[in-house]
Amino acid sequence: MKDRFYQYIQDLQDSITAKLEAVDGKATFQQDHWKRPEGGGGRTRVIENGNVFEKGGVNISAVHGKLPDSMQNYFGVEDADFFACGLSLVLHPKNPMVPTVHANWRYFEMYNKKGEIVDQWFGGGQDLTPYYLFEEDATHFHQTCKTACDKHHPEFYTNYKKRCDEYFYNSHRNEGRGVGGLFFDYCKASEEMSMQNWYDFVTEVGDSFLEAYVPIVEKRKDLPYTKEQRDWQEIRRGRYVEFNLVHDKGTLFGLKTNGRIESILMSLPPHVQWVYDHHPEAGSEEEKLIKVLQNPVDWV
C-alpha cells in the first residue's frame, strides 16, 4: 500500500504542477530534492512571482525511521517505527479576487519491533480561503468535493465538511480560516471500509483537486483590484499564517520529526500585514467575508 500511494502522489504532483504552470503562463515550478538524515526525503516544487501565483508549493515526501519520543507519547506507543508519505500544497495567488487554496493527502504506517504493521491510516483534505467572497466559487468547490465523496459513502461529504469547518478554525479569532472543504484523518480499516476502499476514496479526492480549484482561478485571475483590496488580502493572509503556526497538526508533525523546515514553512505567503485592531468597514465586502467565516455555511 505504501509503495502504491507513494507512486500515486508522485504522479499527482506531476499533473498538478503541469496544469498550474499552464494556468500561470509565466512562472514555472523550481524543483528541489532533499533527504532526511533519519530516513527518507522528498521532492519540493515551488512557484514564485508568476502572472497568477505569487507563491505556491506542491510538495511530496516519504519519511521513515524511529518515531520521535514526542510523537510516541502522542500516539501512546513505545519503540515504534513509522513510515509517512504525502502530498501537501498551498497556492497564494497575486490577485485578491482569487482564493488561496490548501490540500493534503497522506498515508501513515506504524511498526512493532519485528517490523510488522501495527497501525495504518489515510488522511487528507482540501479547503478554500477567499479574500473576497463569490458564493458561486464556494459552491463549485464544495460541489466538486461532494461529488468525489458521494461515490464512496453517502455520509462522507457531510462528516468531512463538518470536520473541516471545525479543524480550520482560528479559535483565538473566533473565525474560520476560510470557507472549508474536506478534512479527514485516521481513516483505518473497518468492517465497512478496507484499506483498499480508503485508498480509492483518497485518490478520488486527490484527482478532483484541479477540477475544484482551476475553474475558480480562471474566472477571477484577470479581475481588476485596488491597493486597498490588496492590503485586505495581506491582512487576511496574516490569519492564514496564525493558523499554520498555532494550530496546524501537519506543521507540528513536520517540526517534531525533523522535517525539512523550508518545505514545512513553504505554505507561508511572501507579503503579509498585521494591522493593530483592524476592523472592516460596516456593510463592506470585507465585512461580508468576516460574517461568513464566523459561522459555517452549507454551500451545497
Image (tube, rainbow, N blue to C red):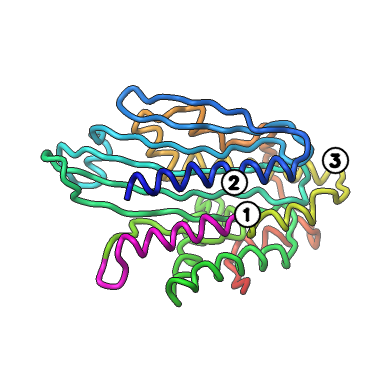
Number of other residues with Cα within 10 Å of mark 3, as a class: few under 14, some 14 to 19, many 20 or more: few
Figure check: 285 above or below 147: above
**Secondary structure type for disc 3:** helix
Q: Which residue is mark 1?
A: 210
- In primary-sequence order, the first of circles 2 and 1 is 2
- In primary-sequence order, the first of circles 3 and 1 is 1
Identify the disc placed on residue 152.
none
Q: Are marks 2 and 1 in contact (CB under 8 Å)?
A: yes
Mark in front: 3 vs 2: 2
- Which residues lie in the magenta part? 190-209
Q: Separation of disc 2 and disc 1 at Cα?
A: 9 Å
Q: Which residue is mark 3?
A: 227
Figure check: 216 above or below 114: below
**Which residue is pictured at 78% across the width and 44% down the height?**
95
Identify the disc placed on residue 15.
2
Q: Main secondary structure of the magenta part?
A: helix
Q: Position of residue 118 (x, y in %)?
A: 18, 50
Magenta span includes 196? yes
Q: Determine whether, in the image, residue 291 is placed left or right of residue 95.
A: left
- Amino acid of disc 3: Lys
Please state which of residues 259 and 96 is positioned toward the viewer in this rendering: 259
Number of other residues with Cα within 10 Å of mark 2, as a class: few under 14, some 14 to 19, many 20 or more: few
- Amino acid of disc 2: Ser
